[in-house]
Structure formats: structure tokens, C-alpha cells
Image (cartoon, rainbow, N blue to C red):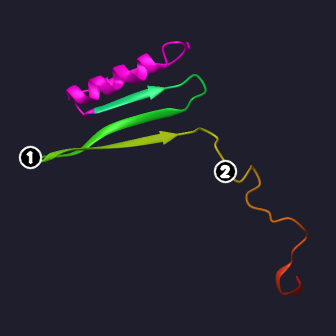
Amino acid sequence: MRVLACLGLLLSATAAHAQGYSTVINRETKSVTTTAPNGTTATTTQAAQTSSGTTYVTTISHPGYQPMGAKGYRPTGDYHPMGR
């Protein structure tokens, strides 16, 4: 849990120069969530803990992010398979 708190503090300190960042530490779910002004969130959660170490999973979400644009993938040209 200390690692999660340190990670949250590190994320907050990294973003200290920009306003609007918020960090939430949830001890029950063992997670740290940082939200950016543009709505992007990064959540780090403790996934497993064994005698040899602890595993964390980080998920980053970008609201409205569409890697191929709003209309999806469209190759260049006017391609119609099978003569359609």
C-alpha cells in the first residue's frame, strides 16, 4: 500500500506544474487514480502479492480517443472488393 501511496504522490508531483490534476488513493481497492484536465485517467491497482513480490497493473484511458479517426479505418482510394 505504501508503494501505491508513493506512486500517487509521484504522479501528483510530476503534474504539480499543471493545474487541474487530481489524485485519489483508495485503500479498499488498493488503487491510485490520477485524472488530467483533459479527462485522461491513469489507474494503478495492486493485482497480486506473493512472498517474492507485488504485481501492479496500470490502465490509462483517453476519453473520446479514436486511433483511426471518427469514421474508422478507410484506406486511400475508392476500393470496392469483388466489384461492389
Q: In the rendered structure, which amino acid carries the disc numbered 2?
A: Pro
Which residue in the protein does label 1 denote? 51
Q: Would you place residue 32 above or below residue 79 in this image?
A: above
Which region of the structure is painted magenta?
1-30
Q: SS of the residue at dot 2?
A: loop
Of residue 13 and residue 21, the one placed in the foreground of this image is 13
- Does the residue at mark 1 contact the one at mark 2 (Cβ under 8 Å)? no
Q: Quadrant of the C terminus?
A: bottom right
Going by the picture, which residue comes out furthest to the bottom? 82
7 on left or right of 59: left
The label on residue 67 is 2
Q: In the rendered structure, which amino acid carries the disc numbered 1?
A: Ser
The label on residue 72 is none
Q: SS of the residue at dot 1?
A: loop
58 on left or right of 29: right
For residue 62: magenta? no
